[in-house]
Image: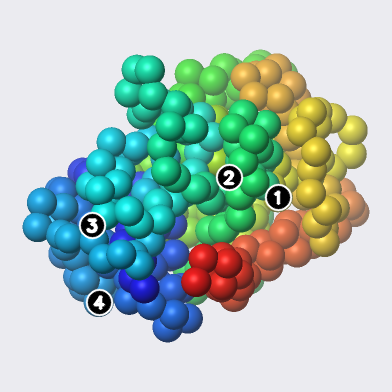
Amino acid sequence: MRVVIFFPPAAGLTGGMQVLVQVAERLRELSHCPVFFLWEKGPEKFLKDMGFEVVVSRDFRFNTYDLFLVPEGWPNVLALSMKAGIRNFVYCQNWAYLFSGLPQGVSWHDLPVEFISVSDPVRVFIRKSLNRNTPVIRPAIDDQIFYPPESKPRDRIYIAYMPRKNKALYRQIRRIFQERNKDLEVSWVSIEGVPPDQVAGHLRKSHVFLATGFPEGIGLPPLEAMACGCFVTGFAGLGGWDYMRQAGSGYVPDIPLRQVAWQGNGFYSADYDVLDAALKLEAAVRLYRDRDLGLEGLLEQSRLTVRAYSKENQQNELSRWIRTVN
């Protein structure tokens, strides 16, 4: 048996593509089977430098016992494997794009595919929309890159954010915050277009992380921020509720939340509710300004959260999946 992973064409590495590489690394560590990357165009050298065999789609021939792993949004790629009669798995990393790539008139029920979810909310989404039960394979946080500092700056409070998604909503939240808090001296840390080690550096010097991204399959930046000692506020994008738990009163989604080993780890708002997000951000900043005694307990819940997204846990989830398909 071989696992063949389709690597989408892109100018650079997205978070979802990095998770595909993580999956390949864990499978290689498990030594259950060879792992190949199938690509049309993309960062081939990056994959080869990591020791993976990279094959071009037009030259590749599937074997009978291959498993083909395709990220959601690329159902047309399944045409490469259907004639071979192999098992096809759609790895849904964002519920919002599950149906976006299907040709007109084609249903997922028409295609010989099984599904894997990147988070429990995605699992619920697939079960309710397609009546399919799926295993969950979550991403891992690299603790060699994302880890807390010995201490945070004391000169002022730093608020980190990533403007790539929903920049206009970030601007509204910031404006509301500033109008309400002219006495609070804060610095805003924009994180965009830099490699992971620089992302981690910005997060380590920041006190609060404002999450503005939605929709999300799981939302890695808030988890990375927690790993770097930030207190998280903002939007969950649905998928973030795999690990986000409301600290105190506030919005909770309608979907059932899985049992976890931690309690409230942030102040969260319904997606698009910029007023509530600004108020939650204000409350988070005041935790630091007022040296609130409850802050350390909240940050401890964040640390407990991050531990659940280790390479070992990811490997265990992959091992369970491989045993079911072997």
Which quarter shows the N terminus?
A: bottom left
Q: Which residue is mark 4?
A: 51
User: If you read the primary sequence from the N terminus, does the residue marked by circle 3 or circle 1 appear first?
Assistant: 3
User: If you read the primary sequence from the N terminus, does the residue marked by circle 1 or circle 4 appear first?
Assistant: 4
How far is disc 3 from disc 1 in space, using C-alphas?
A: 31 Å
Q: Is residue 224 left or right of residue 7?
A: right
- In this view, 83 is above or below 325: above
Question: CB atoms at circles 1 and 4 under 8 Å apart?
Answer: no
Q: Is residue 59 left or right of residue 300?
A: left
Q: Which residue is mark 2?
A: 218
Three-letter code for the amino acid on which mark 4 is drawn: Gly
Disc 1 crowd rating (10 Å Cα; few below 14, some 14-19, many 20+) is many
Q: For the image shown, how many numbered marks are present on the structure?
A: 4
- Asked where in the image residue 122 lies, by quadrant, the reply is top right
Q: Which residue is mark 1?
A: 243
**Residue pictured at 10% horizontal, 51% vertical:** 58
How far is disc 3 from disc 2 in space, using C-alphas?
A: 25 Å
- In this view, 52 is above or below 217: below
Q: Residue 155 appears at what percent x and percent y?
A: 62, 51
Q: Residue 131 appears at what percent x and percent y?
A: 64, 35
Three-letter code for the amino acid on which mark 1 is drawn: Tyr
